[in-house]
Image (cartoon, grey):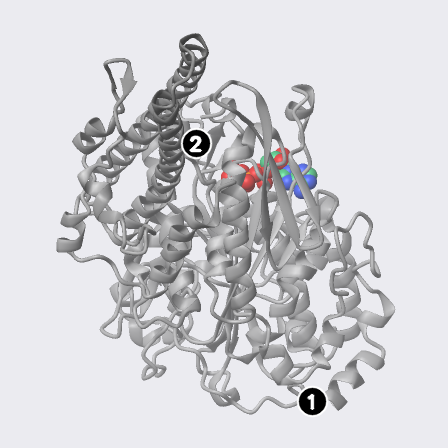
């Protein structure tokens, strides 16, 4: 739609997708089968033949290379940790096993691994051996025990000796962010910690980039505390410009000057302690391609790992917690292990509908440098391509998981089981269908798959936050994979990334509407305020009377029920192209004929004059719920056009009435002629506006159809 989306398409064969494979990295066949788990649910029996724990951690001290210049804080922390814990902590007394030459190590087997290769080789699922179920509650000494916590803080700890996060470095902050003081936050009691919002929506605006500055593009986003306004320049029918303001409210809005440290403090830091309490948390970035998702997400896992390790070495010292890292991507609906030469993974479901990622390698880590190295390797292996807005666009969803595990009853011979998990998802850029029309088939299919999964994700978050019985996890691979992070006690942080330039206005509004929906549908917390803000957002954004906006709010209420219209309803609300044909206004005998509502639209009207938009138009019923959801999104746009059309129609009716009154009044002929011709010209302008809106609508419908065809063909 805008120029950005149309630039720099990829040629089909050359495919700028990079398939970079990290040479020298850990061999696919390494590790015991317990490493195969992504930390998903499992059947607990087992254990007799489980291999003993292997530590694939490799320690920054000796290698150093991986850390390179970027070591910075991490190296400092590591050294400090060594100083503090080198003697006492089990993790730091284990032999170093650098991964770069771990191929041979991978073939090493413990006695317990001497089992049928077909049974235990990586890639095969043995549900009985996987630690996929959260560890049942176990007494954890010192957990939220303020005495011991303060003890560790006040004693000589690395926090005292070498704080790695600059104290209160708040330059350029949009608003007061919480201080980074993890251990201090631990002083809060358990209840307080678990009161962290179930879902938090944060928006981050990036600065204008060089390209945008060179084009003299305006920054159209203003931020005030936790509200944000998009200033959209629009054209009236008579081609005069006007600015429409769209105001949104979120849990936090971070301006372009906010650092990644501050983003971490606002988003992930509060949930880190909770994952020691049998909680699974997910943090993901959403937004248009080039809006800063990767920039935002990339540092978060490392910062979180640092805090996790600090907690493990302070508050939970000697309590047997272990940290594991896995990193995989979903590309084109398929899973690839980013820490194992992009080995294709498969997902299986057991009888209890527990999902396991078969063959996924997990690495036990005990220092920041190792994690850093793993993240860098995984990121380099990710599928990227070029979009108009981003030369190195992520074309996959990358999922990095930090799992905290613990041996049952402290028995080290048993495989550790998941206590909690923190998943970081760098989603592929959201794209509008209109931006991909000129792209090659592969790109378009990627776009369709990406959009499908983003919509499925939104649907799941909504359903979860509203405690709905049915969570539509099967909507996409992404949501299937994340199922276990969402069930039970879970937390979700969504970071919506937006570009500030005028050329991205449409994308930005879409991103914010997506975020707004996720937030405003939240049952927990300030639901009243959220509903209000949602209404306000829509009111502002459409510049229409509230009555025209109400149907959209109705959508929200309807959606909360998670019900989908049955087939009959869909049939009844079928919106066919013919119906729009009939709607075109026509001139007859020099007069504009009344603008009839189509039969189908009439059916949307409710007794109170409001329109109910819950019902989806009828589309290919083979398409999954997420596709229905896309339809719903497009339906929203269609609703908007319809609302505008009704507004125009009302204006026309008023004008028509005025004309009739004038004709009836016995005015001098010449004056009347003048007036009538003026009104006629207004009417023809309005008619042109209606035509425009109809073309807009037809365009949406066409796109929707194309998308559905694409998705269904892609799914086959
Ligand atoms: N807050 C920011 N401050 C400075 N530069 C930023 C910021 N956010 C993004 N950028 C820069 O903008 C460019 C695009 O960012 P990034 O690759 O993170 O986008 P993306 O949303 O992940 O895109 P895609 O979905 O295509 O992968 C990068 O060069 C990045 O360094």
Measuring 72% from the left and 46% from the top, which residue is drawn there?
Answer: 70
Badge 2 crowding class, 10 Å Cα cut-off, few under 14, some 14 to 19, many 20 or more, is some
Which of the two residues, 354 or 343, is positioned nearer the viewer here?
354
Image vertical order of residue 705 relative to residue 106, above or below: above
At x 62% / y 31%, what residue is drawn? 501
Q: Quadrant of the C terminus?
A: top left
From the viewer's perspective, is residue 328 above or below residue 48? Answer: above
- Residue 605 in view in this figure: yes
Q: In the rendering, at what x and y percent does residue 192 appear?
A: 64, 80
Look at mark 1 in the image and give the residue it sits on.
Answer: 145
Image quarter of residue 559:
bottom left
Give x and y (percent) for residue 142: 67, 88
Q: Residue at x 54, y 49 (%)?
A: 537
329 or 108, nearer to the observer: 329
Q: Are marks 2 and 1 in contact (CB under 8 Å)?
A: no
Q: Quadrant of residue 500?
A: top right
Whichever of callouts 2 and 1 sits on the residue coming sooner in the sequence is: 2
Query: Which residue bears the numbered disc 2?
Result: 17
x and y percentages locating residue 362 in the rendered image: 47, 62
Quick check: which quadrant has ligand 1? top right
């Amino acid at each position: 739609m805008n120029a950005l989306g149309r630039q720099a398409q990829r040629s089909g064969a050359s495919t700028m997708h990079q398939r970079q494979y990290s040479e020298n990295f850990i061999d696919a066949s390494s590790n015991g089968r317990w490493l195969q788990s992504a930390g998903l649910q499992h059947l607990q029996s087992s254990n007799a033949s489980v291999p003993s724990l292997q530590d694939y951690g490799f320690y920054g001290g000796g290698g150093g290379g991986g850390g390179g210049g970027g070591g910075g804080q991490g190296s400092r922390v590591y050294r400090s940790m060594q100083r503090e814990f080198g003697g006492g902590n089990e993790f730091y007394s284990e032999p170093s096993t650098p991964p770069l030459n771990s191929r041979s190590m991978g073939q090493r087997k413990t006695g317990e691994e001497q089992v049928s290769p077909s049974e235990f080789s990586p890639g095969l699922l043995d549900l009985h051996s996987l630690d996929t179920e959260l560890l049942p509650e176990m007494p954890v000494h010192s957990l939220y025990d303020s005495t011991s916590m303060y003890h560790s803080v006040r004693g000589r700890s690395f926090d005292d000796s070498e704080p790695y996060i600059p104290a209160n470095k708040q330059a350029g902050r949009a608003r007061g962010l919480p201080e980074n003081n993890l251990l201090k936050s631990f002083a809060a009691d358990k209840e307080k910690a678990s009161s962290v919002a179930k879902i938090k929506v944060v928006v981050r605006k990036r600065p204008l980039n060089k390209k945008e500055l060179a084009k003299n593009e305006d920054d159209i986003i203003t931020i005030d505390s936790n509200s944000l306004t998009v200033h959209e320049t629009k054209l009236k029918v008579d081609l005069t410009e006007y600015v429409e303001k769209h105001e949104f409210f979120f849990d936090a809005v971070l301006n372009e000057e906010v650092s990644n440290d501050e983003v971490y403090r606002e988003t992930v830091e509060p949930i880190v302690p909770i994952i020691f309490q049998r909680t699974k948390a997910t943090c993901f970035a959403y937004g248009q391609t080039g809006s800063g998702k990767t920039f935002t997400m990339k540092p978060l896992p490392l910062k979180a790992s640092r805090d996790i390790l600090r907690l493990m070495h302070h508050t939970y010292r000697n309590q047997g917690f272990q940290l594991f890292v896995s990193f995989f991507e979903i590309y084109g609906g398929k899973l690839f292990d980013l820490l194992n030469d992009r080995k294709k993974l498969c997902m299986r479901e057991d009888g209890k509908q527990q999902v396991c990622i078969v063959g996924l390698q997990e690495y036990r880590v005990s220092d920041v440098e190792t994690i850093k190295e793993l993240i860098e390797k995984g990121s380099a292996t990710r599928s990227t391509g070029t979009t108009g807005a981003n030369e190195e666009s992520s074309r996959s969803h990358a999922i990095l998981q930090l799992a905290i595990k613990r041996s049952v009853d402290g028995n080290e011979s048993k495989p550790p089981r998941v206590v909690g998990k923190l998943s970081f998802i760098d989603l592929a850029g959201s794209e509008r269908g209109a931006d991909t029309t000129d792209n090659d088939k592969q790109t378009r299919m990627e776009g369709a798959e990406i959009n499908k999964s983003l919509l499925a994700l939104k649907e799941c978050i909504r359903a979860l936050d509203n405690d709905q019985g049915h969570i539509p996890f099967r909507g996409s691979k992404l949501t299937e994979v994340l199922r276990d992070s969402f069930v039970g006690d879970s937390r979700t942080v969504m970071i919506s990334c937006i570009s500030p330039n005028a050329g991205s206005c449409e994308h930005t509004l879409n991103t914010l509407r997506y975020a707004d929906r996720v937030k405003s549908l939240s049952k927990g917390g300030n639901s009243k305020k959220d509903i209000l803000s949602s209404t306000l957002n829509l009111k502002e954004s459409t510049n229409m009377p509230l009555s025209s906006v109400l149907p959209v709010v109705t959508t929200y209420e309807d959606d909360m029920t998670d019900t989908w219209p049955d087939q009959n309803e869909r049939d009844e609300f079928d919106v066919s192209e013919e119906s729009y044909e009939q709607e075109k206004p026509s001139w007859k005998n020099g007069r504009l004929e009344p603008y009839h509502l189509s039969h189908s639209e009439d059916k949307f009207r409710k007794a109170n004059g409001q329109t109910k938009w819950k019902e989806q138009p009828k589309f290919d019923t083979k398409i999954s719920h997420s596709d229905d959801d896309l339809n719903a999104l497009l339906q929203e746009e269609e609703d908007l056009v319809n609302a505008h059309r009704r507004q125009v129609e009302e204006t026309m009716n008023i004008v028509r009435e005025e004309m009739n009154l004038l004709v009836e009044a016995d005015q001098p002929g010449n004056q009347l002629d003048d007036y009538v011709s003026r009104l006629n010209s207004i009417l023809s302008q309005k008619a042109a506006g209606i035509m425009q809106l109809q073309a807009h609508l037809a365009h949406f419908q066409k796109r929707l159809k194309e998308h559905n065809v694409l998705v269904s063909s892609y799914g086959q």
